Image: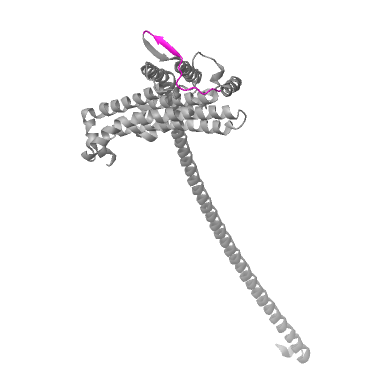
Amino acid sequence: MFDFDATLPLMAVQFLILMFLLNQIFYKPLNNALDERADYIRKNQTEARERLSEAKELASQYEKQLAEARKESLQIIAAAKAEAKKIAEEQIAEAQKEAQAKREEAAKEIDAQKQAAMQSLEQQVDVLSRQILEKLLGPELVK
Amino acid sequence: MEMINALNVLNSFSLAEIEVGNHFYWEIGNLKIHGQVFLTSWFVIAILILASLAAIRNVQIQKAPSGIQNFMEFVLESLRDLARAQLGEKEYRPWLPFIGTLFLFIFVSNWSGALIPWKIIEIPNSELAAPTNDINTTVALALLTSIAYFYAGFSKKGLGYFANYIEPIPILLPIKILEDFTKPLSLSFRLFGNILADELVVAVLVFLVPLFVPLPLMALGLFTSAIQALVFATLAGAYIHEAIEGYDEEHE
């Protein structure tokens, strides 16, 4: 069971040869492959991360722009509303003024006509009273 | 005598025979080597090399790997984790081939011993089994580990490595020196004992009850084989780490 002979050193040499052979055809190429793949993955990952951050930046930029546009539109709407209100108020005031003027004019005209009517009525009253007097007293007395 | 004959008849039916210490000797010059160990270790080495070659035939980097490349990348990542856990992020790269190859060689050896019915192939005087159930193999690997951690210590700290022996207190010096001997001894005997015992237990059970009963033990054998490979590689990493890292640095 325990007989040592030339098997021992030959086995050691054989093992060393196997080690160098495997180093050439197994460890080196596959280590390289693993490292290169790790590099490749890392590169892709950083690239993807960069792209993601870029995309996020763009998205936030767009969002900012969108918010600005929304604010602007709100402002425009508010301005337009204010202007419309102003215009409406102006027009109402104008219309009221016009109406007032027309009413005053009408009142004046009414007054004038009343005056005229009263005048003509007075004249008629004069004439009529004269005629009544003439009838009662006779035309010669009335002078 | 008749009992023994009956046993022999039984033996000739079963695939398993219990033989320890019989070797299929090859002689090179006047050196004797164990042929059966080399045959199976060549098989193991061939598996490892073929799998590696298949994995790197056309390496996909930008796409997700598939098939054998995916599998071998998974293996490599596990080995990297193993080495990194012992040696740390900064130091593990140069030692990855050593620790990784230790694990792969021991693991494939153990599992080839457990899964492949080597006994079908007949060779004179012996039988094929996992290379790791020969003490020569495990001692070779353990001595390589010792050399590796001495090399690691000296290349990192020069002669300052000897300071390790008297830190944190010089009173431990004898124990530290003893450790240099016990480390390879325990590494090699642990592996050797586990694998040999596992094969023996399975062989004995197959010899006693040929059907079904040995199966759970075979499964257990697969488990211990994997664990032993892991333990060997992990300990090798831990020893190398111990040699590299000084007492002071660890506590900074």
Dominant secondary structure (helix, strand or loop) of the stretch shown in magenta: loop
Q: Magenta stretch containing residue B8, yes or no?
A: no
Vertically, is B106 above or below A71? above
Measuring 76% from the left and 85% from the top, which residue is drawn there? A131
Residue at the top extreme of this rendering: B29
Measuring 37% from the left and 15% from the top, which residue is drawn there? A6
Residue at the front extreme of this rendering: B1
Give the residues drawn in magenta, as a range: B16-29
Vertically, is B41 above or below B207? above
Q: From the viewer's side, name the closer residue of A38 and B208.
A: B208
Q: Is residue B61 visible?
A: no
- How many tags in the picture? 0
Q: Magenta stretch containing residue B19, yes or no?
A: yes
Where is residue A45 shown, x and y percent of the image? 46, 34
Vertically, is A135 above or below B237? below
Residue at the right extreme of this rendering: A135
Where is residue B210 shown, x and y percent of the image? 61, 28
The quarter of the image holding the N terminus of chain B is top right
Measuring 54% from the left and 58% from the top, which residue is drawn there? A82
Q: From the viewer's side, name the closer residue of B5 and A143.
A: B5
In this rendering, position of residue B147 left or right of residue B194: left
Vertically, is A121 above or below A102? below
In this rendering, position of residue B105 left or right of residue B240: right
Where is residue B33 shown, x and y percent of the image? 40, 14
The quarter of the image holding the C terminus of chain B is top left
Q: From the viewer's side, name the closer residue of A120 and B250.
A: B250
Q: Is residue B1 visible?
A: yes
Q: From the viewer's side, name the closer residue of B71 and B63.
A: B71
